[in-house]
Amino acid sequence: MVPSAEALSNRGPAAARWLIAGSLWLLAVAGGFGALLRYASTPAPQDDAPPGQWPAATALTRSDDRSQLLLFAHPHCPCTRASVAELARLMGRFHDRLDARVLVVQPPGAGDGWADSALRERASAIPGVRVSIDGDGVEARRFGAIASGTVLVYDASGRLLFHGGITASRGHEGQSFGQQRIASLLTTGKADSDQAPVFGCVLFDGETSRARRQPHVDS
Amino acid sequence: MSTADWVTAATDVIVQRANERLEAHRRALFEGTDRLFAWLMAGQWLFGILVAHFFSPYGWEGKVKTVHFHVWVAVLLGGALSSLPIALALLRPGWWVTRHVIAASQMLWSALLIHLSGGRIETHFHVFASLGILAFYRDWRVLGTATTVVIADHLARGILWPESVYGIVNPEWWRFLEHAFWVVFALAFLIWAGRKSLREMEQIAEGGAQLEALAEHEWRRTSVLERTAAG
Protein backbone atom coordinates (compact mmCIF):
# COMPACT_ATOMS: atom_id res chain seq x y z
CA MET A 1 0.00 0.00 0.00
CA VAL A 2 1.46 3.37 -1.04
CA PRO A 3 1.29 5.98 1.73
CA SER A 4 -0.36 9.28 0.86
CA ALA A 5 1.71 12.43 0.41
CA GLU A 6 0.22 13.80 3.60
CA ALA A 7 1.17 10.65 5.47
CA LEU A 8 4.71 10.89 4.13
CA SER A 9 5.07 14.53 5.14
CA ASN A 10 3.74 13.75 8.61
CA ARG A 11 5.94 10.72 9.14
CA GLY A 12 9.05 12.66 10.20
CA PRO A 13 7.54 14.79 12.98
CA ALA A 14 5.25 11.93 14.11
CA ALA A 15 8.16 9.50 14.32
CA ALA A 16 10.17 12.09 16.25
CA ARG A 17 7.29 12.56 18.71
CA TRP A 18 7.06 8.82 19.25
CA LEU A 19 10.82 8.62 19.67
CA ILE A 20 10.69 11.27 22.40
CA ALA A 21 7.72 9.53 24.04
CA GLY A 22 9.59 6.21 23.88
CA SER A 23 12.72 7.69 25.42
CA LEU A 24 10.73 9.26 28.26
CA TRP A 25 8.93 5.96 28.76
CA LEU A 26 12.21 4.07 28.96
CA LEU A 27 13.57 6.57 31.49
CA ALA A 28 10.42 6.35 33.62
CA VAL A 29 10.37 2.54 33.53
CA ALA A 30 14.10 2.21 34.25
CA GLY A 31 13.81 4.73 37.09
CA GLY A 32 10.80 2.92 38.54
CA PHE A 33 12.47 -0.47 38.48
CA GLY A 34 15.64 1.07 39.92
CA ALA A 35 13.67 2.57 42.81
CA LEU A 36 11.92 -0.77 43.38
CA LEU A 37 15.24 -2.63 43.41
CA ARG A 38 16.70 -0.11 45.84
CA TYR A 39 13.69 -0.32 48.15
CA ALA A 40 13.66 -4.12 48.11
CA SER A 41 17.35 -4.43 48.89
CA THR A 42 17.62 -1.74 51.59
CA PRO A 43 17.66 -3.37 55.02
CA ALA A 44 15.87 -2.02 58.06
CA PRO A 45 17.86 -0.37 60.87
CA GLN A 46 19.38 -3.08 63.01
CA ASP A 47 20.91 -3.19 66.47
CA ASP A 48 24.66 -3.72 66.29
CA ALA A 49 24.92 -5.58 69.57
CA PRO A 50 22.11 -7.84 70.74
CA PRO A 51 22.88 -9.60 74.04
CA GLY A 52 25.74 -12.03 73.50
CA GLN A 53 24.38 -14.20 76.31
CA TRP A 54 20.77 -15.05 77.04
CA PRO A 55 19.68 -12.16 79.29
CA ALA A 56 18.97 -13.16 82.86
CA ALA A 57 16.24 -10.54 83.13
CA THR A 58 14.08 -11.97 80.35
CA ALA A 59 10.75 -13.58 81.15
CA LEU A 60 11.21 -15.94 78.21
CA THR A 61 12.18 -19.51 78.92
CA ARG A 62 14.95 -21.16 76.91
CA SER A 63 15.39 -24.73 75.87
CA ASP A 64 18.49 -26.27 77.43
CA ASP A 65 18.79 -29.19 75.02
CA ARG A 66 18.24 -27.40 71.73
CA SER A 67 19.14 -24.09 70.18
CA GLN A 68 16.64 -21.33 70.82
CA LEU A 69 15.37 -19.25 67.92
CA LEU A 70 13.50 -16.00 68.53
CA LEU A 71 11.69 -14.16 65.74
CA PHE A 72 10.39 -10.68 66.54
CA ALA A 73 7.44 -9.78 64.36
CA HIS A 74 5.31 -6.74 63.73
CA PRO A 75 1.84 -8.28 63.36
CA HIS A 76 0.88 -6.19 60.34
CA CYS A 77 4.20 -5.96 58.50
CA PRO A 78 3.78 -7.37 54.98
CA CYS A 79 7.52 -8.04 54.65
CA THR A 80 7.43 -10.32 57.69
CA ARG A 81 5.04 -12.68 55.93
CA ALA A 82 8.07 -13.89 53.98
CA SER A 83 10.10 -14.23 57.21
CA VAL A 84 7.37 -16.44 58.70
CA ALA A 85 7.29 -18.54 55.53
CA GLU A 86 11.06 -18.96 55.74
CA LEU A 87 10.80 -19.82 59.44
CA ALA A 88 8.40 -22.60 58.46
CA ARG A 89 11.00 -23.93 56.01
CA LEU A 90 13.74 -23.75 58.64
CA MET A 91 11.57 -25.59 61.14
CA GLY A 92 10.72 -28.22 58.56
CA ARG A 93 14.42 -28.90 58.25
CA PHE A 94 15.65 -28.38 61.81
CA HIS A 95 12.63 -29.08 64.03
CA ASP A 96 14.74 -31.50 66.09
CA ARG A 97 17.50 -28.96 66.71
CA LEU A 98 15.54 -25.75 67.15
CA ASP A 99 13.07 -24.50 69.71
CA ALA A 100 11.43 -21.58 67.93
CA ARG A 101 9.40 -18.77 69.36
CA VAL A 102 7.71 -15.92 67.53
CA LEU A 103 7.20 -12.79 69.58
CA VAL A 104 4.45 -10.62 68.16
CA VAL A 105 5.46 -7.16 69.24
CA GLN A 106 2.75 -4.83 70.48
CA PRO A 107 4.21 -1.34 70.70
CA PRO A 108 3.37 0.88 73.67
CA GLY A 109 -0.07 2.45 73.35
CA ALA A 110 -1.46 -0.16 70.97
CA GLY A 111 -4.95 -1.24 71.96
CA ASP A 112 -6.29 -4.70 72.76
CA GLY A 113 -6.52 -6.97 69.75
CA TRP A 114 -3.94 -4.94 67.85
CA ALA A 115 -1.64 -7.97 67.64
CA ASP A 116 -4.38 -10.17 66.17
CA SER A 117 -3.49 -10.63 62.54
CA ALA A 118 -3.19 -13.15 59.74
CA LEU A 119 0.56 -13.15 60.29
CA ARG A 120 0.13 -14.24 63.89
CA GLU A 121 -2.20 -17.05 62.79
CA ARG A 122 0.25 -18.12 60.12
CA ALA A 123 3.08 -18.29 62.65
CA SER A 124 0.87 -20.25 65.07
CA ALA A 125 0.22 -22.83 62.37
CA ILE A 126 3.91 -23.76 62.06
CA PRO A 127 4.53 -27.04 63.89
CA GLY A 128 6.89 -26.66 66.83
CA VAL A 129 6.66 -22.86 66.98
CA ARG A 130 5.32 -21.05 70.03
CA VAL A 131 3.75 -17.67 69.48
CA SER A 132 3.28 -15.06 72.17
CA ILE A 133 2.59 -11.36 72.42
CA ASP A 134 5.42 -9.11 73.50
CA GLY A 135 3.46 -6.40 75.37
CA ASP A 136 4.97 -2.91 74.87
CA GLY A 137 7.84 -4.62 73.07
CA VAL A 138 9.67 -5.22 76.37
CA GLU A 139 11.45 -8.33 75.14
CA ALA A 140 12.17 -6.79 71.75
CA ARG A 141 13.92 -3.92 73.54
CA ARG A 142 15.75 -6.33 75.83
CA PHE A 143 17.02 -8.39 72.89
CA GLY A 144 17.80 -5.31 70.82
CA ALA A 145 15.30 -6.05 68.06
CA ILE A 146 14.36 -2.90 66.15
CA ALA A 147 12.95 -4.37 62.95
CA SER A 148 10.26 -6.93 62.32
CA GLY A 149 11.79 -10.15 61.05
CA THR A 150 14.79 -9.98 63.39
CA VAL A 151 15.90 -13.50 64.26
CA LEU A 152 18.18 -14.39 67.14
CA VAL A 153 19.55 -17.89 67.63
CA TYR A 154 21.10 -18.91 70.98
CA ASP A 155 22.75 -22.25 71.53
CA ALA A 156 21.75 -24.59 74.35
CA SER A 157 24.22 -22.88 76.71
CA GLY A 158 22.66 -19.47 76.04
CA ARG A 159 25.38 -18.10 73.75
CA LEU A 160 24.30 -15.97 70.80
CA LEU A 161 24.99 -17.82 67.54
CA PHE A 162 23.26 -15.63 65.00
CA HIS A 163 21.35 -12.38 64.69
CA GLY A 164 19.71 -10.90 61.63
CA GLY A 165 17.08 -11.63 59.01
CA ILE A 166 16.11 -14.77 57.14
CA THR A 167 14.86 -13.22 53.91
CA ALA A 168 16.96 -12.04 51.00
CA SER A 169 15.08 -8.79 50.53
CA ARG A 170 11.90 -7.01 51.55
CA GLY A 171 8.99 -9.40 51.50
CA HIS A 172 10.65 -11.88 49.16
CA GLU A 173 10.51 -15.57 49.93
CA GLY A 174 13.39 -17.76 48.89
CA GLN A 175 16.87 -18.59 50.05
CA SER A 176 18.88 -16.00 51.94
CA PHE A 177 22.26 -15.65 53.58
CA GLY A 178 20.53 -15.61 56.98
CA GLN A 179 18.97 -19.02 56.43
CA GLN A 180 22.18 -20.45 55.00
CA ARG A 181 24.16 -19.23 58.00
CA ILE A 182 21.68 -20.57 60.54
CA ALA A 183 21.64 -23.92 58.73
CA SER A 184 25.42 -23.99 58.65
CA LEU A 185 25.69 -23.09 62.36
CA LEU A 186 23.20 -25.80 63.31
CA THR A 187 24.81 -28.50 61.20
CA THR A 188 28.55 -27.70 61.34
CA GLY A 189 28.78 -25.21 64.22
CA LYS A 190 30.36 -22.55 62.01
CA ALA A 191 29.40 -20.09 59.29
CA ASP A 192 31.08 -17.38 57.24
CA SER A 193 29.24 -14.78 59.33
CA ASP A 194 26.97 -14.72 62.37
CA GLN A 195 24.63 -12.04 61.07
CA ALA A 196 22.52 -11.01 58.09
CA PRO A 197 20.50 -7.94 57.14
CA VAL A 198 16.91 -7.69 58.32
CA PHE A 199 14.19 -6.70 55.88
CA GLY A 200 11.05 -5.64 57.68
CA CYS A 201 9.04 -2.83 59.23
CA VAL A 202 10.33 -0.91 62.21
CA LEU A 203 8.78 -2.21 65.44
CA PHE A 204 8.45 1.04 67.39
CA ASP A 205 7.16 4.51 66.53
CA GLY A 206 9.93 6.86 65.46
CA GLU A 207 12.60 4.17 65.80
CA THR A 208 14.02 4.71 62.33
CA SER A 209 15.32 8.17 63.13
CA ARG A 210 16.27 7.21 66.70
CA ALA A 211 18.26 4.16 65.55
CA ARG A 212 20.22 6.36 63.19
CA ARG A 213 20.97 8.93 65.91
CA GLN A 214 22.20 6.74 68.73
CA PRO A 215 23.45 3.19 69.17
CA HIS A 216 21.38 0.78 71.26
CA VAL A 217 22.51 0.29 74.87
CA ASP A 218 22.51 -3.38 75.85
CA SER A 219 20.31 -4.21 78.81
CA MET B 1 -2.25 -10.44 -26.73
CA SER B 2 -1.29 -14.10 -26.97
CA THR B 3 -2.79 -16.72 -24.67
CA ALA B 4 0.55 -17.06 -22.84
CA ASP B 5 0.72 -13.31 -22.27
CA TRP B 6 -2.86 -13.30 -21.10
CA VAL B 7 -2.16 -16.15 -18.62
CA THR B 8 0.96 -14.36 -17.31
CA ALA B 9 -0.93 -11.11 -16.87
CA ALA B 10 -3.81 -12.89 -15.16
CA THR B 11 -1.39 -14.72 -12.84
CA ASP B 12 0.36 -11.47 -11.96
CA VAL B 13 -2.98 -9.91 -11.11
CA ILE B 14 -3.92 -12.89 -8.93
CA VAL B 15 -0.52 -12.84 -7.15
CA GLN B 16 -0.75 -9.10 -6.56
CA ARG B 17 -4.31 -9.43 -5.30
CA ALA B 18 -3.27 -12.35 -3.05
CA ASN B 19 -0.49 -10.21 -1.57
CA GLU B 20 -2.93 -7.38 -0.96
CA ARG B 21 -5.39 -9.71 0.71
CA LEU B 22 -2.60 -11.21 2.85
CA GLU B 23 -1.37 -7.77 3.89
CA ALA B 24 -4.90 -6.66 4.74
CA HIS B 25 -5.43 -9.82 6.78
CA ARG B 26 -2.13 -9.37 8.63
CA ARG B 27 -2.83 -5.71 9.25
CA ALA B 28 -6.24 -6.59 10.68
CA LEU B 29 -4.56 -9.24 12.82
CA PHE B 30 -1.92 -6.78 14.09
CA GLU B 31 -4.49 -4.09 14.80
CA GLY B 32 -6.84 -6.49 16.55
CA THR B 33 -4.02 -7.90 18.69
CA ASP B 34 -2.82 -4.36 19.49
CA ARG B 35 -6.32 -3.52 20.72
CA LEU B 36 -6.41 -6.74 22.76
CA PHE B 37 -3.15 -5.73 24.42
CA ALA B 38 -4.47 -2.23 25.10
CA TRP B 39 -7.19 -3.86 27.22
CA LEU B 40 -4.71 -6.30 28.72
CA MET B 41 -2.32 -3.47 29.68
CA ALA B 42 -5.14 -1.60 31.40
CA GLY B 43 -6.27 -4.81 33.12
CA GLN B 44 -2.76 -5.61 34.28
CA TRP B 45 -2.44 -2.14 35.75
CA LEU B 46 -5.59 -2.63 37.79
CA PHE B 47 -4.50 -6.16 38.70
CA GLY B 48 -1.08 -4.91 39.80
CA ILE B 49 -2.72 -2.34 42.09
CA LEU B 50 -4.96 -5.05 43.54
CA VAL B 51 -1.99 -7.38 44.07
CA ALA B 52 -0.06 -4.62 45.84
CA HIS B 53 -3.11 -3.74 47.91
CA PHE B 54 -3.66 -7.39 48.84
CA PHE B 55 -0.05 -8.39 49.57
CA SER B 56 1.34 -5.18 51.02
CA PRO B 57 -1.23 -2.44 51.63
CA TYR B 58 0.70 -0.56 54.31
CA GLY B 59 4.19 -0.05 55.55
CA TRP B 60 4.51 0.20 59.33
CA GLU B 61 6.67 1.93 61.88
CA GLY B 62 5.31 0.84 65.22
CA LYS B 63 1.66 1.87 65.26
CA VAL B 64 2.07 4.33 62.41
CA LYS B 65 1.02 3.06 59.04
CA THR B 66 1.62 4.58 55.64
CA VAL B 67 0.63 3.48 52.17
CA HIS B 68 3.13 0.80 51.20
CA PHE B 69 5.78 1.62 48.62
CA HIS B 70 4.51 -1.27 46.49
CA VAL B 71 1.12 0.40 46.13
CA TRP B 72 2.78 3.54 44.76
CA VAL B 73 4.93 1.39 42.50
CA ALA B 74 1.84 -0.41 41.20
CA VAL B 75 0.07 2.88 40.52
CA LEU B 76 2.97 4.89 39.11
CA LEU B 77 5.35 2.35 37.57
CA GLY B 78 2.46 0.15 36.47
CA GLY B 79 0.78 3.18 34.92
CA ALA B 80 3.98 4.20 33.16
CA LEU B 81 4.54 0.65 31.94
CA SER B 82 1.08 0.46 30.38
CA SER B 83 0.85 4.04 29.12
CA LEU B 84 2.99 3.91 25.97
CA PRO B 85 1.67 0.55 24.74
CA ILE B 86 -1.92 1.73 25.23
CA ALA B 87 -1.20 5.04 23.48
CA LEU B 88 0.45 3.26 20.56
CA ALA B 89 -2.29 0.64 20.32
CA LEU B 90 -4.95 3.34 20.16
CA LEU B 91 -3.13 5.89 18.00
CA ARG B 92 -0.89 3.72 15.83
CA PRO B 93 -2.45 0.24 15.68
CA GLY B 94 -0.73 -2.08 13.26
CA TRP B 95 2.57 -0.15 13.27
CA TRP B 96 5.51 -2.53 13.76
CA VAL B 97 6.86 -0.36 16.57
CA THR B 98 3.58 -0.75 18.47
CA ARG B 99 3.79 -4.51 18.78
CA HIS B 100 7.47 -4.46 19.75
CA VAL B 101 6.83 -1.89 22.49
CA ILE B 102 3.90 -4.02 23.65
CA ALA B 103 6.14 -7.11 23.74
CA ALA B 104 8.79 -5.33 25.82
CA SER B 105 6.20 -3.86 28.17
CA GLN B 106 4.43 -7.18 28.61
CA MET B 107 7.62 -8.88 29.76
CA LEU B 108 8.41 -6.00 32.12
CA TRP B 109 4.92 -6.49 33.54
CA SER B 110 5.96 -10.04 34.42
CA ALA B 111 8.93 -8.67 36.38
CA LEU B 112 6.75 -6.10 38.15
CA LEU B 113 4.04 -8.60 39.10
CA ILE B 114 6.68 -11.01 40.44
CA HIS B 115 7.96 -8.18 42.65
CA LEU B 116 4.52 -7.12 43.82
CA SER B 117 3.54 -10.66 44.75
CA GLY B 118 6.65 -11.09 46.90
CA GLY B 119 8.53 -13.26 44.43
CA ARG B 120 5.90 -15.98 44.39
CA ILE B 121 7.03 -18.75 42.09
CA GLU B 122 3.49 -18.98 40.68
CA THR B 123 3.72 -15.42 39.34
CA HIS B 124 6.65 -16.50 37.15
CA PHE B 125 4.07 -18.31 34.99
CA HIS B 126 3.08 -14.84 33.74
CA VAL B 127 6.19 -14.93 31.54
CA PHE B 128 5.03 -18.00 29.66
CA ALA B 129 1.40 -16.86 29.49
CA SER B 130 2.64 -13.57 28.00
CA LEU B 131 4.71 -15.35 25.35
CA GLY B 132 1.60 -17.33 24.42
CA ILE B 133 -0.51 -14.19 24.05
CA LEU B 134 2.24 -12.38 22.11
CA ALA B 135 2.22 -15.32 19.69
CA PHE B 136 -1.22 -14.06 18.56
CA TYR B 137 0.72 -11.62 16.36
CA ARG B 138 2.10 -14.57 14.39
CA ASP B 139 5.33 -12.56 14.08
CA TRP B 140 8.47 -14.23 15.39
CA ARG B 141 10.23 -10.85 15.65
CA VAL B 142 7.80 -9.83 18.39
CA LEU B 143 8.67 -12.98 20.33
CA GLY B 144 12.33 -12.12 19.73
CA THR B 145 11.86 -8.71 21.36
CA ALA B 146 10.04 -10.29 24.31
CA THR B 147 12.79 -12.87 24.74
CA THR B 148 15.49 -10.22 24.57
CA VAL B 149 13.80 -8.30 27.38
CA VAL B 150 13.47 -11.46 29.49
CA ILE B 151 17.13 -12.33 28.93
CA ALA B 152 18.27 -8.76 29.70
CA ASP B 153 16.17 -8.75 32.88
CA HIS B 154 17.54 -12.13 33.97
CA LEU B 155 21.11 -11.11 33.20
CA ALA B 156 20.88 -7.79 35.03
CA ARG B 157 19.07 -9.15 38.07
CA GLY B 158 21.12 -12.33 38.01
CA ILE B 159 24.20 -10.18 38.55
CA LEU B 160 22.73 -7.54 40.88
CA TRP B 161 20.20 -9.60 42.82
CA PRO B 162 20.25 -13.30 41.90
CA GLU B 163 17.80 -14.49 44.54
CA SER B 164 15.04 -12.37 42.99
CA VAL B 165 15.35 -14.35 39.77
CA TYR B 166 16.49 -17.80 40.81
CA GLY B 167 15.25 -17.99 44.40
CA ILE B 168 18.71 -18.91 45.66
CA VAL B 169 21.60 -16.79 46.87
CA ASN B 170 24.53 -18.32 45.02
CA PRO B 171 23.23 -19.71 41.73
CA GLU B 172 25.60 -21.66 39.51
CA TRP B 173 26.81 -19.67 36.49
CA TRP B 174 24.79 -21.91 34.16
CA ARG B 175 21.50 -21.39 36.02
CA PHE B 176 20.72 -18.59 33.58
CA LEU B 177 20.94 -21.12 30.71
CA GLU B 178 18.43 -23.40 32.42
CA HIS B 179 15.87 -20.58 32.55
CA ALA B 180 16.67 -19.59 28.96
CA PHE B 181 16.22 -23.20 27.84
CA TRP B 182 12.58 -23.31 28.92
CA VAL B 183 11.86 -19.98 27.27
CA VAL B 184 13.47 -21.23 24.05
CA PHE B 185 11.51 -24.49 24.40
CA ALA B 186 8.23 -22.56 24.48
CA LEU B 187 9.37 -20.19 21.73
CA ALA B 188 10.30 -23.00 19.35
CA PHE B 189 6.73 -24.27 19.32
CA LEU B 190 5.14 -20.83 19.29
CA ILE B 191 7.26 -19.76 16.29
CA TRP B 192 6.51 -23.02 14.50
CA ALA B 193 2.78 -22.56 15.11
CA GLY B 194 3.00 -18.92 14.01
CA ARG B 195 4.71 -19.77 10.73
CA LYS B 196 2.22 -22.58 10.06
CA SER B 197 -0.59 -20.17 10.70
CA LEU B 198 1.01 -17.61 8.37
CA ARG B 199 1.21 -20.21 5.60
CA GLU B 200 -2.49 -20.88 6.09
CA MET B 201 -3.15 -17.16 5.81
CA GLU B 202 -1.19 -17.13 2.54
CA GLN B 203 -3.25 -20.03 1.22
CA ILE B 204 -6.47 -18.31 2.21
CA ALA B 205 -5.29 -15.11 0.48
CA GLU B 206 -4.38 -17.03 -2.69
CA GLY B 207 -7.68 -18.89 -2.67
CA GLY B 208 -9.57 -15.63 -2.18
CA ALA B 209 -7.65 -13.93 -5.01
CA GLN B 210 -8.36 -16.83 -7.37
CA LEU B 211 -12.04 -16.75 -6.48
CA GLU B 212 -12.08 -13.00 -7.09
CA ALA B 213 -10.41 -13.48 -10.48
CA LEU B 214 -12.87 -16.21 -11.40
CA ALA B 215 -15.81 -14.09 -10.33
CA GLU B 216 -14.47 -11.13 -12.29
CA HIS B 217 -13.90 -13.30 -15.34
CA GLU B 218 -17.42 -14.69 -15.06
CA TRP B 219 -18.85 -11.19 -14.66
CA ARG B 220 -17.00 -9.99 -17.78
CA ARG B 221 -18.08 -13.00 -19.78
CA THR B 222 -21.71 -12.51 -18.73
CA SER B 223 -21.51 -8.80 -19.54
CA VAL B 224 -20.15 -9.51 -23.01
CA LEU B 225 -22.87 -12.08 -23.65
CA GLU B 226 -25.55 -9.68 -22.42
CA ARG B 227 -24.18 -6.87 -24.56
CA THR B 228 -23.98 -9.19 -27.54
CA ALA B 229 -27.55 -10.36 -26.95
CA ALA B 230 -28.73 -6.80 -26.56
CA GLY B 231 -26.87 -5.65 -29.69
Image: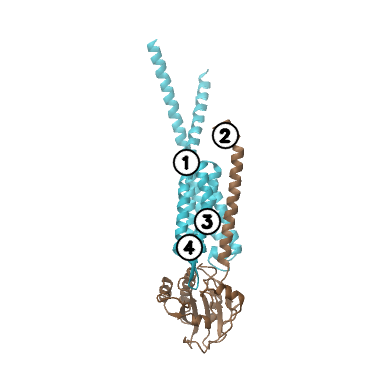
Chain colours: A brown, B cyan
Provide the residue designation for mark 4: B117
Q: Position of residue A51 (x, y in %)?
A: 56, 84
Three-letter code, disc 2: Ala
Q: Secondary structure at mark 1?
A: helix
Q: Is disc 2 in contact with disc 3, using a CB cutoff of under 8 Å? A: no
**10 Å crowding of disc 3: few (<14), some (14-19), many (20+):** some
**Chain letter, disc 2 residue:** A
B208 sits left or right of A181 in the view: left
Q: CA distance from mark 3 to mark 4?
A: 17 Å
Three-letter code, disc 4: Ser
Of labels 3 and 1, the one closer to you:
3
Vertical placement of A19 versus A204: above or below?
above
**Chain letter, disc 1 residue:** B
Q: Is disc 3 in contact with disc 1, using a CB cutoff of under 8 Å? A: no
**10 Å crowding of disc 4: few (<14), some (14-19), many (20+):** many
Res A197 seen here:
no
Which is nearer the N-term, disc 3 or disc 4? Answer: 3
Residue at 44% from the left image edge and 36% from the top image edge? B204
Q: Are marks 4 and 1 on the same chain?
A: yes
Viewer-side residue, B225 vs A98: A98
Which is nearer the N-term, disc 3 or disc 1? Answer: 1
Provide the residue designation for mark 1: B29
Of labels 2 and 4, the one closer to you:
2
Q: Extreme front residue here?
A: A109
Q: Secondary structure at mark 2?
A: helix
Q: Are marks 1 and 2 on the same chain?
A: no
Viewer-side residue, B224 vs A130: A130
Q: Position of residue A14 (x, y in %)?
A: 59, 40
Q: Which mark is residue A7?
A: 2
Q: CA distance from mark 2 to mark 3?
A: 34 Å
Q: Which quarter of the rendering shows the C terminus of chain B? A: top left
Res B112 seen here:
yes
